[in-house]
Each structure stands twice: as C-alpha cells, then as structure tokens.
Amino acid sequence: MILAIETSCDDTCAAVVDPADGTIVSNVVSSQGIHDRYGGVVPEVAARHHLELLDAAIDDALASAQIGLDDVSLVAVTQGPGLVGALLIGLAEAKALALVRGLPLAPVDHLQGHVAANFVAPEPFEPPFVCLIASGGHTLLARVEDRDGFTVLGATLDDAAGEAFDKGARLLGLPYPGGPALQALAAEGDPHAHEFPTAAGVAGLDFSFAGLKTALLYALRDDPEASKPDLAASYQRAIVEQLARRVERALEQTGLERVAIGGGVAANGPLRERIRGLGVTAHIPPMALCTDNAAMIGSAARYVTPLAPGAYDALDAYATGERGL
Ligand code: KG4
Ligand code: ZN
C-alpha cells in the first residue's frame, strides 16, 4: 500500500492508496479551522498545526484502511509547491517514516497531484485531456498526454481563481475560506445584475483576476446599499465565465475533446455545471478529491520514480524550490 502525506497549505492530509489500481483505501483531511480568524492562511501557524495534527491524521488513515505500517510499501509526500514551513513538516515526517521502515519515498508535485485526482479507481479518466487546475494558490490550464506529467498551456498573470473568490468574499464581509461562502450568498442573487470583467482582453490561455477584484471594490464604494447577493452572484459568474471560456479556447487550440478539473475552486457548483455543459467529455472528480487531499498525492505517486530507502537528502531542496523534479 502507498501511504501518502500532503501538508502544502492548511489542510493536514494522509491517505492510503492501492498501488495496483489506484483505489483510495482511506483519505483523511484534518482542516485547521484556526485560520478563519485571520482572514487567510498564516504560514507559521499552518506549519505548527501540521506538526500537531499529522501523526493523528496518519494513524486515522491507517486505522480506517485497516492496515499497519507493515503493509506500507511506499511513502509518498507533496514536495512542493506550497508554503515552505508547511511542506517541511510533511517531508520530515515522510522521511522519518520511510527511513525507519527502510521504504522508498516518492516526492510528488502538488499540481501533478491535482491532475492525478482524475486517475483514481474505479473510473480513471484516461489522457489525453485538457485539465483546469484552479485553487487558492494556482490557476492553470494543463495539457495532459500521459499519467506522469503535463505541459502548461496557460496560467494566471496575477491572482489565482481561489484567491479571487477569497478576496471578493472578504470585500463582501464573508468569512475565510471565501469560495464556499461566496457561492452560498450568490445562490440568492442575480448573476446578471452587474457586468464584471472576464479578462476578455487577455489573449491566449492566460488568466487575470486583478481587474475583477477592483471592479467589485468600486461597485461597493459607488453604491454601499447594493444587494450583496447580486454582487456575489455577478462576481462568481465573472470568475466562472473566465475559467470556462479559457477551457473552451484550450479545447479548440489542442483539438482535444476531453476535459477534467481539479483544485479547490473545482468544488464550485456553477463552475462544475458550466464545464459539464461544454459539450465535450468532462470529468468532474468528487469534491473531496478537488480540494487538497493526500489520496491525489498517492495516486500521482504511482507514476513517480521513488527515491531509494535512505537516499532522501534531496527532498528539502525540492521543498524550498532550490531543485525542481
Ligand atoms: O486546492 P485547495 O483546497 O488549496 C490550495 O491548494 O489552494 O483550494 C482552496 C481554494 C480557496 O481559495 C477556496 O476559497 C476555494 O479553493 N474554494 C472554492 C470553493 N471551495 C473551495 N471556490 C469557489 N467555490 C467553492 N465551492
Ligand atoms: Zn491544491
């Protein structure tokens, strides 16, 4: 069995994945909650909480898989990108476990993890496909030809899509994380009440959300009495439209007729609907596999060449970005 660990941001995650076919045997996410009061993730606080929560998350993942460490043949861990302090907790834990047990260790790229959420059993989505990864830290369009990598077709020029949700939510007085709160408020509003920008002027497959955030700021400033649900619905629509139109463009450019989505923003209901309605074969993973989790890291680890038992020194350099995989 693969024991997978993910600590790149504020979710402390451990999972057990069957290397034979990518079946998720257990998938534990311990959300830190604590960051709500700061209106965003505080890196130092996230790292300290990973330290407190990770042993318990691993114990839970093993217990719910009904296995012990003797049944683990490979340890997988997110090597980056992410918050350095947070990553280092996962890496130190993975190294210690693997070293003591004499196991190989698979360093996994976090974004490849989001792509690999599409490869889990029982219905893996086969490449080639276009993959939209939209989270709090990243927004990119990937061309996936094989299970072990992707090429970047486009990325954000400023904020990530999840960041746009979080910052918009903050302007509207909603709690962190903003995505789910903004989606809930938007459900009561009119998405056509305001015409917010969709970065139509940005050519190619790149994204831009900075103008949208400013537009919301000005709308609130110009009319403090404006309906918050209408603003939320219009703001969400602008994000969803920008994402969906770039996906359409990517499908046209590549000639591919298959699309998958991943990352926390892929949990957004209207986005899921819009992508389903594109008229191509769409793979929309369950919500728990869209937001950060360790099962996706275990899934990606099946296609990574692991470091031999004991030869893990390079890992810290991966986390701090001194080395790429
Ligand atoms: O992938 P993820 O769990 O962590 C990162 O790697 O960033 O993504 C978290 C992001 C946050 O910005 C959060 O607001 C957003 O995903 N998010 C959503 C929804 N659920 C989470 N955005 C829009 N609608 C949602 N339902
Ligand atoms: Zn993520």
Image (cartoon, rainbow, N blue to C red):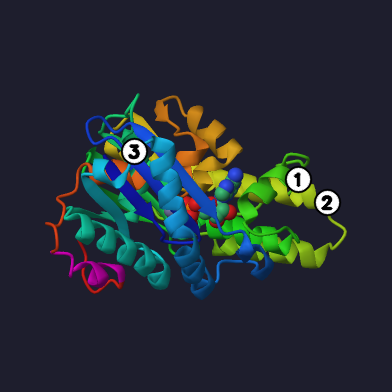
Residue at image point 35% right, 41% down: 16
Where does label 2 land, which residue?
Answer: 227
The Cα–Cα distance between marks 1 and 2, rounded to whole angstroms, is 9 Å
Q: Position of residue 23 (x, y in %)?
A: 33, 31
Queried whether the magenta region covers residue 256, the answer comes back as: no
Q: Earlier in the sequence, mark 1 or mark 2?
A: 1
Q: Secondary structure at mark 1?
A: loop
- Bin the neighbour count of mark 3 within 10 Å (Cα to Cα): few under 14, some 14-19, many 20 and up: some
Residue 262 visible, this orientation: no
Range of magenta residues: 311-319
Amino acid type of the residue tagged 2 in the rendering: Ser
Callout 2 touching callout 3 (CB < 8 Å): no
Residue 157 visible, this orientation: yes
Can you tell which mark lies on residue 67? 3
Q: Secondary structure at mark 3?
A: loop
Give the mark toward the camera: 1 or 3: 3
Amino acid type of the residue tagged 1 in the rendering: Ala
Residue 261 relative to residue 100: left or right:
right
Queried whether the magenta region covers residue 318, the answer comes back as: yes
Where does label 1 land, which residue?
Answer: 193
